[in-house]
Image (spheres, helix red, strand yellow):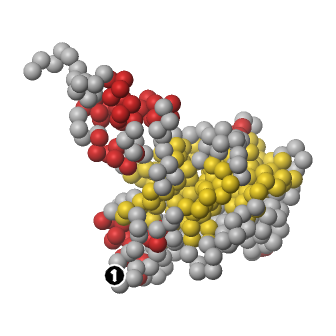
Amino acid sequence: MGGGEEKALIPGLPDDIALDCLARVPHRFHSSLRPVCRRWRDLVTAPFFYEHRVRIGTAEDLIFLVQALVPIENGHQDTGGEVDEQGKEMAAATKCRPPVYGLSIYNATIGEWRRLAAAEPVPMFAQCAATGGKVVLVGGWDPLTLDPVEEVRVLDLVTGRWRRGAAMAAARSFFACAATGGRVYVAGGHDGQKNALRSAAAYDVATDRWAALPEMGEERDECQGVAAAGGKFWAVSGYGTESQGRFDAAAEWYDAATGEWRREEGVWEVGDAGVGGGGAACFAAAGGLWCVDVKRGVREYDGIGRAWRPVAGVPELLRSTPCAAAMGGTAAGERVFVMGAVGEGGTHGGWVFEMGSKKWTPVETPAGFTGFVYSAAAVRL
């Protein structure tokens, strides 16, 4: 056969129609499209393909969750969702202590849960961030020694492949983390001796390099990280080595344009617990800083008035809010995924908050995905 004429994407169909057909295939099946032929491989690994999915309305909102695997009953994990063979092996380890963590995915577009394969268990309390079609897991605790780690793992959402990224300069855990402009920012947390940190750094995902940032004005262990509009990276609240558990009402934000940290008072409610403690979960949405907690509901931070504006309450069954991730879109149409404890049973479940209508919708959460979630990141792909 001659090689002068390129084969059609789908025989018998014009390429524009074939493109629309392939763009409607759910993301979880893209790994099966790549081996079909060279044109399909080149198509589904090209940025244009995912831009086209957004343009025609077939992009999917994927929520990546660093989640504790639930205990097994009678040797089997009741998931109600899809767990690959490697995920089952990891789930088997939940018979032991400490808990084993994995990377779960909730597809908010089609309502599907699944767990990703990884060569080894995800570090406990690892931070999860997403930028440029990559999901980045940073730091946390070694699941065997319970020591903080400096490791970085990067998942390419186009190829489905994992790689080890350049490690942080020093191990840290319970730190602020967020992604913006192709970089993953980290600040605060504590080291292996439980000393609170004020150091900060930025990881360039494309070049696989870390750059040190100026130190914050205060030590901030268990602070929350948020990337807001204008390149602002927030490190909200936290506490110093000498004030264990007494959370600071102030926050600091890093201005990438000037390379300086700025302090802002009164951002955090004194007395709230930190990350994972049932307190407020901060997130970025509609270009600004938001939070949700069971006592005060959903609120938006007014940077001019230096105060929080109440927006909506929370569902009665939602008893804690460890994490939240905005799914993007216009301010009126943006949705936020929230995972927290539900009812009195101690299990966790998901909810979706629609910012325009202020409506909460419970997410059907299979038993195998009701474990505690430490961090989350949203990707539209």
Query: In the rendered image, which quarter is residue 117 located in?
Result: bottom left
Name which quarter of the figure residue 3 lies in: top left
**Residue 280, can we see it?**
no
Q: Secondary structure at mark 1?
A: loop
Tell me which residue sits at (28%, 45%) in the image: 32
Residue ranking furthest to the right: 305
- Left or right, 281 with reference to 139: right
Q: Is any atom of residue 335 visible in this view? A: yes
**Residue on which disc 1 sits:** 75
Q: Is residue 78 above or below residue 329?
A: below
Looking at the image, which residue sits at the far left? 1
Q: Is residue 88 above or below residue 7?
A: below
Q: In x, y percent, where is residue 229? A: 71, 40
Observer-nearest of 309 and 198: 309
Provide residue 336's location: percent of width, then percent of height: 63, 52
Q: How many marks?
A: 1
Q: Say if 15 sits above or below 371 in the image.
A: above
Q: Residue at x 27, y 28 (%)?
A: 9
The image quarter containing residue 88 is: bottom left
